[in-house]
């Protein structure tokens, strides 16, 4: 006969100070796996809610509402903000203090933009001027040196009409300002290089495409979105909607897609090549959406709205993933994602800039590999069981301020009533005489070449 | 010539490769945890894409686990292989012990404790510690790795059963009147009066529930982390001391005096399953680790193997058993008086006898328990305890994060905290534990299409028309009367069907409205609503 008894003693005898880990992935050793995973998902959802503290701090210093912000691509912890009284400040986000002030504008500052190399700041305002500033090197900020030194603009260009927005090209020397018409400037010239006009209405915002340096998109107060190509001498395409768009942002990872923040509380994502239908309609806000910015990953974007809240949406999600609000934060006029995708900065009516975390329960700082793996596991297991009612209830739960909650309920009843009426009208007509229009198309009036 | 390979060689190589591939496939199947989802029926493209990506990941992880099993397992399973005409059950323990290495041979021992009654034994889940309880009150805990006695004490009361709780720090003892919980040092921590005169104790370690059956046939579940009594179920089937927990789904199986086996969960007052297993009282019950097999033994001299998916007998052996146990690798041990038999699965649920053992001097065996992660069977008998070598019974490779026989105190503390954090609620105990997170099938009955309804009506009408009419005599069977009767039959059949469909449709019959015309004065009657 041949006998072998399982020889486990040679493992036992190696009693060294660091225990060796043995793995056996046999499913028979692990009973009731799904129940264990479900329990862990439930606990993880609860813990996530416990650790959800998104608000980091407020930066105050401005004495009037903040109208625009700009990020600096070279320095992660710098942000520029311009207010309604003409005061432009450079902030150090880590210390939450002003580094530098740029006084000069006589009225509201309507647009701020930094050049691609981060050296130049362009600002424009209602006093019909465009000012160019040199950005100082950000040193370690001394806490005593609170206000910082003021700078002189390197150039001031005066033009014929008030400006409503400015944006700098991603890969070149040109920048565009909008107001009564769209003007394209060169950094060194004191007059616009070219001007575009389509219709007689004010153009409200402008954005250059991150992928194609010569393409830009503007939104105007005649409820239109216009695409321009600088290589052509006339505007390329125009899309008219039912309500006007306050702000537009291109997706940095998919430069053919852009999302427009509309006055009718929705955000519409479009493919710039096919403007007759929106790709996704992002619903959630209860009042006009004022500003929108994409995360550098291109997977989510943040919107700030007139209803005093900030919402974070997935790039293809129709409802918001997250909503941030504070009692002290009034109408949000501008929001920005920082260039590392971890923080959001919001500028609002109450003269403060607020710093938020993009993932509310994230642990900031350097994580040990074990911590990171545990966090990834918990995220994965929550994702797997998020459809179960217990887990879903906890993951979905957000505290909303009462006015927002009530307004949202009211909107829901109104929309449901409208839908019901639509259905009944359709049911009482000849079949096919009232075609169903997808919501993505409903708010678009027409597209013009 | 070295370069040229003959056709047969190549064929052999290909066959070898194919075999290896098949084996790999089987291994991957084992780690796959079920079939891949059928994504062809989905119409939502986004969801389909997401699910396809996920299925691919599962495939990769199953393959990686299969490869890890092939290359990284440190130990092989033990075996006892006969040569030529030898039979495995002819080999005695002495000959086996002589052949194996010295460390394994030390694991087989006999401890004679003549004074303090038949002994019951219990092992911790990692097989390292053994708890021994003599009927006359002798309790002892031993570390089997170092073969040393940790604590030994006398409770001076009848001890009916012992069970470890989640680790070796706490254990529960079913004593004369109540159940007690002791510390590792022999200190009495709790005296649990609610359980009453418990006869058997079982611990569900993922739920931290201590289950006991008492002399009135009451099943108690107590959560020992919070101390709360989760359930107190009156089985209604009398006194029984045959209780086992099914490790696959944490369901308690009880064997009763009428030959019934019932399965219980704490949230349900009635048993989940009641099976009539034997023609007399059930004497022993055991569950296989995989959850498919149950072995029961009764006074009718039969040991039956049940398939727990279909609740049918797979095999039945003529043998007596006072105690049964399944090992981690599927060996079945049954004890009968002083005789012990171990059966092994020879493919296709066909259990054949593998080893036999007879207790010296006719000591009567009380409990048999396989030691986890070792090829050892522990026996508690009337004169003490012994331990015999059974090659191939234990799982040779343990997982440090599941059960670790060589855990340090730090690892033990960490494991305790982690298992408390992911403690399962008693509601998660169910017959099929994989049903969690699945979608309940919709209760809606499929509505029959119009055509189907019409066809059915036609069939019924045909059947009614063709019924045989009784021919009446004495001039009562006129043609007209017969025709009328036939029509009435058809109408009756039709009406029944229509009522059925109307009921399911949910449209109640409109009630007859009482006419208002009589109430209105004559001058206004022309303004009354005209009704059809």
Image (cartoon, coloured by chain):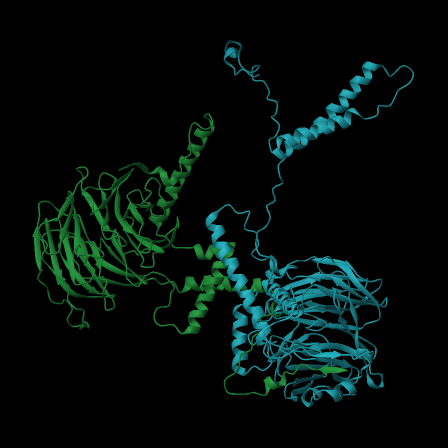
Q: Is residue B6 above or below residue B237?
A: below
Q: Quadrant of residue A201?
A: top left
Q: Quadrant of residue A341?
A: bottom left
Where residue B461 appears, as percent x and y from the top left, is: 73, 26
Per the rendering, the colour in which chain A appears is: green
Q: What residue occupies the far top of the structure in this picture?
A: B523
Asked if residue B120 shows in the view, the reply is: no
Q: Nearer the viewer, residue A277 or B257?
A: A277
Q: Which chain is cyan?
A: B
Where residue B335 appears, as percent x and y from the top left, is: 80, 75
Q: Is residue A292 above or below residue B365?
A: above
Name which residue lies at 69% across and 90% down.
Answer: B102
Q: Quadrant of residue A58?
A: bottom left
Q: Is residue B402 above or below residue B455?
A: below
Q: Quadrant of the N terminus of chain B?
A: bottom right
Q: Quadrant of the C terminus of chain B?
A: top right
Q: Is residue B157 above or below residue A144?
A: below
Name which residue lies at 38% across and 65% down.
Answer: A362
Asked if residue B231 shows in the view, the reply is: yes
Q: Nearer the viewer, residue A317 or B381?
A: A317
Relative side of B412 to B382, left or right:
left
Q: How many marks?
A: 0
Q: Nearer the viewer, residue B403 or A279?
A: A279
Q: Nearer the viewer, residue B171 or A119?
A: A119
Q: What residue occupies the far front of the structure in this picture?
A: B1
Relative side of B373 to A216, left or right:
right
Where residue B264 appears, as percent x and y from the top left, is: 69, 61
Name which residue lies at 76% across and 21% down.
Answer: B488
Where residue B216 appears, as percent x and y from the top left, is: 75, 66
């Amino acid at each position: 006969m041949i006998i072998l008894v399982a020889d486990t003693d040679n493992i036992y005898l190696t009693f060294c100070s660091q225990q060796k880990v043995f793995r056996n992935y046999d499913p028979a050793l692990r009973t009731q796996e799904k129940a264990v995973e479900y329990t862990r998902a439930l606990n993880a959802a609860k813990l996530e809610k416990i650790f959800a503290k998104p608000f980091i701090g407020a930066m105050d210093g401005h004495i009037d509402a903040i109208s625009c912000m700009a990020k600096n691509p070279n320095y992660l912890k710098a942000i520029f903000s311009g207010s309604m009284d003409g005061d432009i400040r450079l902030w150090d986000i880590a210390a939450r203090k002003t580094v530098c002030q740029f006084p000069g504008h006589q009225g509201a500052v309507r647009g701020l933009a930094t050049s691609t190399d981060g050296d130049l700041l362009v600002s424009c305002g209602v006093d019909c001027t465009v000012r160019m500033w040199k950005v100082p090197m950000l040193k370690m900020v001394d806490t005593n040196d609170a206000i910082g030194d003021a700078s002189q603009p390197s150039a001031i260009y005066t033009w014929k009409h008030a400006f409503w927005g400015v944006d700098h090209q991603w890969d070149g020397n040109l920048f565009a300002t909008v107001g009564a018409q769209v003007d394209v400037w060169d950094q060194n010239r004191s007059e616009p290089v070219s001007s575009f006009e389509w219709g007689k209405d004010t153009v409200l915002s402008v954005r250059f495409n991150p992928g194609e340096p010569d393409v830009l998109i503007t939104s105007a107060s005649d409820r239109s979105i216009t695409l321009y190509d600088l290589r052509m001498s006339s505007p390329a395409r125009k899309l008219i909607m039912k309500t006007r768009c306050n702000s537009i942002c291109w997706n940095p990872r998919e430069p053919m897609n852009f999302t427009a923040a509309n006055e009718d509380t929705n955000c519409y994502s479009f493919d710039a090549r096919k403007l007759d239908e929106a790709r996704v309609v992002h619903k959630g806000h209860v009042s006009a959406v004022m500003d929108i910015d994409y995360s550098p990953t291109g997977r989510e974007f943040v919107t700030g709205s007139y209803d005093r809240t900030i919402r974070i949406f997935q790039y293809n999600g129709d409802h918001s993933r997250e909503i941030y609000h504070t009692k002290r934060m009034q109408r949000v006029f501008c929001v920005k994602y920082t260039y590392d995708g971890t923080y959001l900065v919001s500028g609002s009516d109450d003269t403060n800039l607020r710093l938020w975390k993009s993932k509310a329960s994230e642990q900031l700082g350097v994580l040990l590999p074990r911590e990171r793996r545990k966090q990834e596991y918990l995220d994965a297991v929550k994702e797997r069981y998020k459809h179960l009612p217990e887990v879903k209830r906890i993951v979905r739960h957000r505290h909303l301020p009462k006015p927002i909650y009530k307004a949202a309920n009211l909107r829901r009843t109104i929309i449901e009533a409208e839908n019901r009426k639509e259905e009944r009208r359709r049911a009482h007509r000849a079949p096919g005489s009232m075609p169903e229009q997808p919501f993505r198309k409903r708010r678009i009036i027409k597209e013009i070449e | 010539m070295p370069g040229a390979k003959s056709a047969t060689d190549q064929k052999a190589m290909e066959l070898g490769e194919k075999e290896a591939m098949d084996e790999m496939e089987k291994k991957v199947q084992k780690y796959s945890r079920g079939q891949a989802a059928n994504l062809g029926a989905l119409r939502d493209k986004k969801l389909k894409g997401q699910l396809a990506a996920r299925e691919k990941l599962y495939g990769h992880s199953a393959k990686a686990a299969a490869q890890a099993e092939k290359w990284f397992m440190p130990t092989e399973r033990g075996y006892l292989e006969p040569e030529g005409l030898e039979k495995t059950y002819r080999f005695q323990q002495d000959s086996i012990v002589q052949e194996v290495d010295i460390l394994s041979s030390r694991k087989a021992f006999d401890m004679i404790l003549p004074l303090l009654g038949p002994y019951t034994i219990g092992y911790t889940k990692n097989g390292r510690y053994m708890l021994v309880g003599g009927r006359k009150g002798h309790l002892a805990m031993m570390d089997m790795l170092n073969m040393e006695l940790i604590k030994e004490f006398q409770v001076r009361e009848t001890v009916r059963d012992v069970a470890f709780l989640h680790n070796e720090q706490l254990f529960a003892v079913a004593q004369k009147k109540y159940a007690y919980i002791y510390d590792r040092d022999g200190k009495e921590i709790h005296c649990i009066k609610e359980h009453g005169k418990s006869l058997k104790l079982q611990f569900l370690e993922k739920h931290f529930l201590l289950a006991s059956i008492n002399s009135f046939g009451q099943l108690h579940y107590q959560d020992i982390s919070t101390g709360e009594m989760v359930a107190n179920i009156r089985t209604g089937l009398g006194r029984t001391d045959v209780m086992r927990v099914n490790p696959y789904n944490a369901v308690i199986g009880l064997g009763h005096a009428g030959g019934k086996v019932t399965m219980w969960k704490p949230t349900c007052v009635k048993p989940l399953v009641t099976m009539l297993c034997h023609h007399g009282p059930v004497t022993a019950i055991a569950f296989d680790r995989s959850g498919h097999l149950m072995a029961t033994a009764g006074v009718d001299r039969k040991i039956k193997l049940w398939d727990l998916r279909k609740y049918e007998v797979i095999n039945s052996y003529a043998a007596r058993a006072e105690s049964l146990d399944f090992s981690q690798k599927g060996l079945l041990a049954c004890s009968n008086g002083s005789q012990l038999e171990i059966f092994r699965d020879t493919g296709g649920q066909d259990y054949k006898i593998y080893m036999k053992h007879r207790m010296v001097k006719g000591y009567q065996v009380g409990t048999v328990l396989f030691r986890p992660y070792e090829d050892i069977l522990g026996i508690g008998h009337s004169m003490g305890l012994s331990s015999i070598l059974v090659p191939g019974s234990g799982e040779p490779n343990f997982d440090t994060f599941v059960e670790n026989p060589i855990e340090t105190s730090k690892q033990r503390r960490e494991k305790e905290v982690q298992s408390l954090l992911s403690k399962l609620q008693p509601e998660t105990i169910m017959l099929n534990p994989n049903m969690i997170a699945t979608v309940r099938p919709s209760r809606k009955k499929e509505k029959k299409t119009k055509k189907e309804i019409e066809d059915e009506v036609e069939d019924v009408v045909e059947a009614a028309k063709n019924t045989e009419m009784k021919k009446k005599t004495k001039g009562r069977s006129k043609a007209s009367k017969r025709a009328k009767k036939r029509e009435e039959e058809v109408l009756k059949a039709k009406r029944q069907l229509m009522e059925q469909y109307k009921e399911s449709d949910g449209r109640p019959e409109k009630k007859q409205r009482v006419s208002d015309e009589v109430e209105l004065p004559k001058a206004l009657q022309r303004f009354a609503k005209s009704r059809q």
